[in-house]
Image: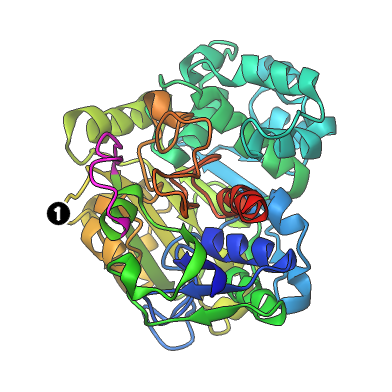
């Protein structure tokens, strides 16, 4: 009998398996797809030689993750590559704000009236970032904070809606940059704890940047799988699990799945019936004949580029998908240009690029024209650079990764109390009514992103139970 079986070979499932194997437990991972990876995969989606990341591509949370930083993943081929700028946000007048590794450069891009405000906003937290992040992302209720004063101070700044924080700024550049950071989790700007979302992304950039993995996001998953194998664990792909009886006997079962999939497989009935899924995304991967022809200079050097004319336009796009159930016009876009940092992703002189816009949950329309019209506003001539494109709406994304229910790449709405209490109110969010079944997906704290912390935290809950029994 195995000590633990993990269902799902995404970053969280693999991290949970590694943490258990490091502590001497026998572990096997079962994955329905033909390769490991979940939201961290790489494939030639358009043309030969163009390596795309179908889901996540830029990794500010991964490079900062306490879980990943504790593992020797570089020995297994994971190397981070940085564009000259982590992120840029262009404006219709040809200027741009930037999120730089340098706080000073970032502050200067926001204008003289807001430079000091930005410095005061991030200044108290950056020197204590590693401790703060570990406290913020650790298993709730099982360890005392290492720096409770800084964590409490961060909580006071993080819990209010981002619209409150935006009032500190005088000019639109700073408000727009921050609104774009919040929109990465598809949360309405006025939602609970949305200030914290923006702060975490900004601080992550200043601490270690927003890099890409050399060769593609698959390198993250492959490194975790290789480490697990060296630790004695096993990985089985092309193995779909429909019920617990499909799995070998084990003392614990750990699911890197959506809560509703877990309930169906483990026979938990309506335990997660109140869990809410959020908006979806419509994503396009491009093979380009050259770099994106941004009007502003800064985006040409950035790994990630946010596209929204101002905070009102970004807020309206989020409101349209979250409250009105319609595709926004124009959409707010998050774009990543991996080949700015990693030329190996495309043939010489060519580039890979992806963009996505938010759409209602389960939307079946085509956002291609709206996305490309929005890109042309800030990069005239973009369409002339397109060699090929691969589109994926909510249905295609869910087929690629079953955790993306209705196209929701966060595996659950990041709004209201569910922002903090995922997947439901519980002192042990990784446990379930079944004493041998646990959940470790992005539906659990600390939430979405490629950082492995839900898997790391869930593994703690599992090994404590195994040791007690």
Q: Residue at x 45, y 58 (%)?
A: 256
Residue 316 is inside the magenta segment: no
Q: What x and y, as percent, mark residue 14?
A: 57, 66
Q: Main secondary structure of the magenta part?
A: loop
Foreground of the two, 266 or 166: 266
* Among the 4 quarters of the image, the one containing residue 135: top right
Report if residue 80 is visible in the image: yes
The residue that mark 1 highlights is 365
Q: What x and y, as percent, mark residue 406?
A: 24, 51
Q: Would residue 103 be found to the left or right of residue 460 on screen?
A: right
Foreground of the two, 176 or 33: 33
Report if residue 368 is visible in the image: no
Quarter of the rendering occupied by the C terminus? bottom right
Foreground of the two, 98 or 19: 19
Q: What x and y, as percent, mark residue 313?
A: 35, 29
Q: Would residue 462 be found to the left or right of residue 333 on screen?
A: right
Residue 272 is inside the magenta segment: yes
Its colouring scheme is: rainbow
Judge whether 78 appears above or below 123 on screen: below
Foreground of the two, 43 or 459: 459
Tag 1 secondary structure:
loop
Spot the residue most to the left: 364
Q: Residue at x 40, y 49 (%)?
A: 434
Q: Residue at x 40, y 34 (%)?
A: 414
* Among the 4 quarters of the image, the one containing residue 149: top right
| Magenta segment | 266-279
Density class for disc 1 (Cα within 10 Å; few <14, some 14-19, many ≥20) is few
Q: What x and y, as percent, mark residue 365?
A: 14, 54
């Amino acid at each position: 009998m195995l000590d633990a079986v993990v269902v799902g070979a995404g970053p969280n499932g693999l991290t949970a398996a590694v943490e258990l194997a490091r502590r001497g437990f026998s572990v096997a991972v079962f994955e329905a797809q033909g390769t490991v990876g979940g939201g961290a995969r790489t494939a030639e989606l358009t043309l030969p030689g163009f390596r795309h990341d179908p889901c996540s591509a830029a990794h500010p949370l991964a490079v900062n993750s306490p879980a990943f930083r504790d593992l020797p993943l570089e020995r297994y081929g994971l190397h981070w590559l940085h564009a000259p700028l982590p992120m840029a946000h262009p404006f219709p007048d040809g200027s741009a704000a930037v999120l730089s590794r340098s706080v000073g450069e970032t502050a200067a891009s926001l204008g003289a009236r807001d430079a000091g405000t930005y410095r005061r906003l991030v200044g108290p937290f950056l020197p204590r970032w590693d401790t703060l992040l570990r406290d913020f992302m650790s298993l709730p209720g099982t360890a005392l904070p290492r720096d409770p004063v800084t964590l409490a101070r961060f909580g006071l700044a993080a819990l209010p809606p981002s619209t409150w924080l935006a009032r500190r700024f005088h000019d639109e550049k700073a408000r727009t940059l921050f609104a774009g950071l919040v929109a990465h989790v598809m949360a309405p700007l006025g939602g609970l704890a949305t200030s914290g979302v923006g702060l975490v992304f900004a601080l992550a950039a200043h601490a270690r940047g927003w890099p890409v993995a050399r060769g593609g996001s698959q390198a993250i998953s492959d490194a975790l799988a290789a480490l697990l194998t060296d630790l004695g664990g096993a990985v089985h792909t092309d193995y779909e699990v429909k019920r617990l009886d499909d799995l070998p006997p084990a003392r614990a079962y750990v699911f890197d799945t959506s809560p509703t999939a877990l309930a169906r497989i483990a026979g938990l009935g309506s335990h997660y019936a109140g869990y809410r899924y959020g908006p979806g995304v419509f994503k396009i991967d491009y093979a380009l004949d050259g770099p994106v022809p941004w009007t502003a200079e800064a985006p040409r050097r950035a790994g990630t580029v946010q596209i929204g004319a101002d905070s009102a336009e970004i807020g309206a796009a989020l409101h349209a998908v979250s409250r009105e159930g319609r595709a926004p016009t124009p959409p707010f876009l998050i774009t990543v240009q991996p080949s700015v940092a990693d030329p190996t992703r495309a043939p010489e002189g060519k580039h890979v690029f992806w963009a996505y816009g938010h759409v209602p949950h389960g939307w079946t329309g085509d956002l291609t024209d709206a996305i490309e019209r929005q890109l042309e506003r800030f990069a005239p001539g973009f369409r002339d650079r397109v060699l090929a494109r691969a589109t994926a709406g909510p249905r295609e994304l869910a087929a690629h990764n079953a955790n993306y229910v209705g196209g929701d790449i966060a595996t659950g709405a990041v709004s209201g109390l569910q922002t903090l209490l995922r997947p439901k109110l519980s002192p042990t969010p990784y446990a379930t009514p079944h004493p041998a079944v646990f959940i470790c997906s992005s539906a659990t704290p600390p939430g979405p992103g490629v950082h492995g912390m839900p898997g790391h935290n869930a593994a703690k809950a599992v090994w404590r139970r195994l040791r007690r029994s």
